[in-house]
Amino acid sequence: MEEATTKPTILVVDDTPDNITLLCSLLGDLYRNKIATSGEKALKIARAEPHPDLILLDIMMPEMDGYEVCRQLKADPATRDIPVIFLTAKTQEGDETKGFELGAVDYITKPIVPPILMARVHTHLALGDARKFLEMQNDVLEQQVMARTRQLAALQDAIIIAMASLAETRDNDTGHHIRRTQHYVRELALCLQSRDKYHAELTDENIETLYKTAPLHDIGKVGVPDRILLKPGRLTPEEFEEMKLHTIHGRDAIIAAEKSMEAPESFLLTARDIACSHHEKWDGSGYPEGLAGEGIPLPARLMAIADVYDALITKRVYKDAMPHEEAVKIIESGSGSHFDPEVVAAFSLVKDKFASIAEHFSEEE
């Protein structure tokens, strides 16, 4: 019984009993045979589990001929990969062409020549085994690629967090600022995503990249002297000019990372835009390059609102925390001057989510 189940299964389809007897006698020692005397019965057996490994299919049958059986087999995902060999007395070139177009793998003409039958059955079963092996190998390789991709994504995330933490250790801001701003940015992006203007740029993948790279917006502060970065009070105009350079430091550090790669990764491009341009203003009065309007990269326009809002609601040694409602008014009043009007409109729609994020990642947490 166990030996029988390990043999390949061949479905023999023919409406002539003598032909079935001959075929089964030839195949019986090496293969497990199933028999169908009509097209309908052949389809039923072929679709049942376990599927046959190969089908020997007569063409000339009443009601449903072999061509129609083959067509239906190849149209069904459950049976389309079963190799079909036509058995026929037809020898016209057009008959063979039609069979191959329907998906048959071979033709055997009647009367049956046993050595030819056995050789071709063996060949196509071997080819079927090889195809299944390749499919299995492809599945294994695909799983390995997916696992490696997940590892690389985790490594990328770890590098981003490490870089952001480096800047954090030299700043009076806390890690909560980093976490809040990345959530603010994502909410703005999700709100804008449904608009035709931004749909192509703000894909789910790009929004995820934006969320992950947002913590790098102040990475350039590692290049700002402690006497300025850690000063417990407002900066002088000269000190503020030095502080502005953190955008350049951040941009240059990320560009250096890009140059070490054959092709810049999307997360580095987004990180560079955010780090360099999140202090630019819609009217062109920002820094470091005085960009204006849509000349400011979209990720930076989103971060501009996230960064300013968080600065307003957060207590510092030189100022008290501002209530959410007042911060909202200041952001909205900056529409068209400091901020992109469309991003401000999105902010107005998700302002309550900003408040929830701020509460969830509060400084007292």
Image (spheres, rainbow, N blue to C red):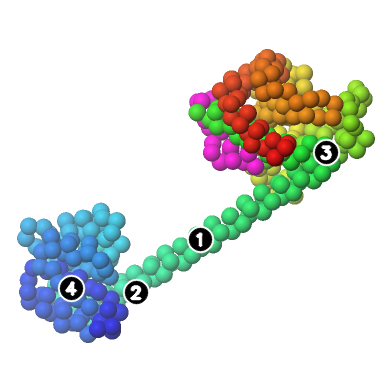
Q: Is residue 85 above or below residue 350?
A: below
Q: Residue at x 82, y 37 (%)?
A: 172
Q: CA distance from mark 2 to mark 1?
A: 26 Å
Q: Is residue 223 above or below residue 162?
A: above
What residue did someone put label 1 on? 143
Quarter of the image that includes the C terminus: top right
Are dots 4 and 3 in contact, CB under 8 Å? Answer: no
Give the residue number, with chain letter if any, for mark 3: 171
Taking the image as shown, residue 253 lies to the left or right of residue 324, namely right
Please report the bounds of the magenta region as a residue range: 195-212
- Residue 42 x, y percent position in the rendering: 16, 64
Circle 4 residue: 34
Q: Is disc 1 in contact with disc 4, using a CB cutoff of under 8 Å? A: no
Q: Residue shown at 22%/85% (left/top)?
A: 29
Q: CA distance from mark 3 to mark 2?
A: 67 Å
Q: Position of residue 143 (x, y in %)?
A: 51, 61
